[in-house]
Image (cartoon, rainbow, N blue to C red):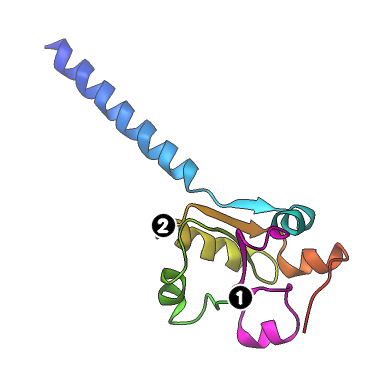
């Protein structure tokens, strides 16, 4: 009688541990402005995505960034067209929306997603260049 309870407990613990590990793998990785700049230099392999509104993008953006507004109804369709095996660095104004967008992309099967910690505000504060 004790063996089935023990076995059930082991199965439950393994299931919980697997779910926890999966959730940890899905955590959004953040990069400082300096780390972002260094990783983005490899422009063939890395894609910058600005998830801010078109009005915000018009105020200035990182060189070469692709605008995909997270608030847009077509965000999911636009990101679905991207190569899921490339590396993406997402940013917004302060980092909140880019982390949300990164989570959504990870859930959709993307494998290498980063968020610029502190967003474009941190980028500018670090003295990094923007384009208009």
Residue beneath the point at 48% across and 52% down: 111
Residue beneath the point at 40% across and 76% down: 77
Percent of width and height locating residue 4: 15, 17
Instruction: Report whether 113 appears left or right of 83.
Output: right
Instruction: Report whether 1 appears left or right of 32.
Output: left
Residue 18's image quarter? top left
Determine which of the numbered discs, if any, sits on residue 107 in the image.
2
Instruction: Report whether 112 appears left or right of 14.
Output: right
Residue beneath the point at 80% across and 75% down: 130
How busy is the neighbourhood of tag 2: few (under 14 within 10 Å), some, or many (20 plus)? few
Question: What is the span of residues highlighted in magenta in the rendered image?
Answer: 40-66
Residues 109 and 116: in front is 109
Count the marks: how many? 2
Residues 128 and 2: in front is 128
Percent of width and height locating residue 92: 65, 70
Above or below 127: residue 111: above
Q: Which circle's residue, 1 or 2, is located before the other in the chain?
A: 1
Q: Which residue is mark 1?
A: 66
Residue 34's image quarter? bottom right
Residue beneath the point at 30% across and 33% down: 15
């Amino acid at each position: 009688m004790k063996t089935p309870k023990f076995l059930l407990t082991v199965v439950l613990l393994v299931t919980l541990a697997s779910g926890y590990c999966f959730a940890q793998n899905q955590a959004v990785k953040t990069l400082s402005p300096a780390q972002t700049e260094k990783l983005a230099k490899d422009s063939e392999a890395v894609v910058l995505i600005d998830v801010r509104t078109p009005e915000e993008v018009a105020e200035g953006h990182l060189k070469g960034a692709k605008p995909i507004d997270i608030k847009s109804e077509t965000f999911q369709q636009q990101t679905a067209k991207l190569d899921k095996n490339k590396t993406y660095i997402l940013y917004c104004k302060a980092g909140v929306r880019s982390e949300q967008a990164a989570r959504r992309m990870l859930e959709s099967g993307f494998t290498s997603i980063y968020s610029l910690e502190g967003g474009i505000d941190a980028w500018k504060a670090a003295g990094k260049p923007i384009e208009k």
